[in-house]
Image: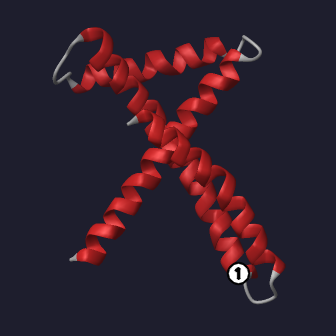
């Protein structure tokens, strides 16, 4: 569900710094704000990596019609996507939009999976 994951990623990327700033505004919550900022950095890195791998896998499924590609083919698709993003960066607006969309997709996917895990563990 790429549309839902893009919106969820946008929400996480906007709300998390605001929440951390609110924690910093209180005298007691500065340490919690620091932890939220550290978690924000981790989710951005994790989201970027998962966004690239998800987009590469989507490209394999879409264009190669491979139900179960080999690990080498997945790595080749990831490398090809990294090269494509690097080339798109030469175009002023398109590269930024593509990289941002991939980042938001990855962050939304990571946040959705974390929420699903917490909900399942709370139900058990």
Crowdedness of circle 1 by 10 Å Cα count: few (<14), some, many (20+)? Answer: few
The residue beneath circle 1 is 31
Q: How many numbered marks have been drawn onto this rendered protein structure?
A: 1
Image quarter where the N terminus lies is top left
Residue 43 in picture, x, y percent from top left: 54, 53
Frontmost residue, 117 versus 42: 117
Q: In this view, does 20 lie above or below 107?
A: below
| Residue 56 image position (x, y, % from top left) | 39, 24
* Residue drawn at the location 54% of the way across and 31% of the way down: 102
Viewer-closest of 33 and 82: 33
Horizontal and vertical percent position of residue 31: 70, 81
Q: Position of residue 91 (x, y in %)?
A: 72, 11
Residue at the spot x=77%, y=15% of the render? 92
Q: In which quarter of the image is residue 87?
A: top right
Left or right? Give the position of 29 relative to 60.
right
- Residue 64 lies in what quarter of the image? top left
Q: In this view, does 4 lie above or below 73?
A: below
């Amino acid at each position: 569900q790429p549309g839902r994951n893009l919106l969820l990623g946008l929400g996480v990327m906007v709300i998390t710094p605001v929440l951390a700033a609110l924690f910093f505004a209180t005298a007691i919550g500065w340490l919690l704000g620091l932890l939220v900022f550290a978690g924000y950095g981790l989710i951005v890195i994790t989201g970027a990596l998962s966004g690239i791998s998800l987009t590469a896998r989507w490209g394999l499924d879409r264009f190669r019609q491979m139900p179960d590609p080999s690990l080498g083919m997945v790595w080749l698709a990831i490398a090809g996507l990294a090269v494509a993003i690097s080339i798109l960066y030469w175009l002023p607006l398109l590269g930024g939009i593509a990289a941002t969309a991939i980042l938001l997709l990855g962050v939304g996917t990571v946040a959705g999976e974390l929420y699903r895990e917490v909900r399942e563990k709370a139900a058990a």
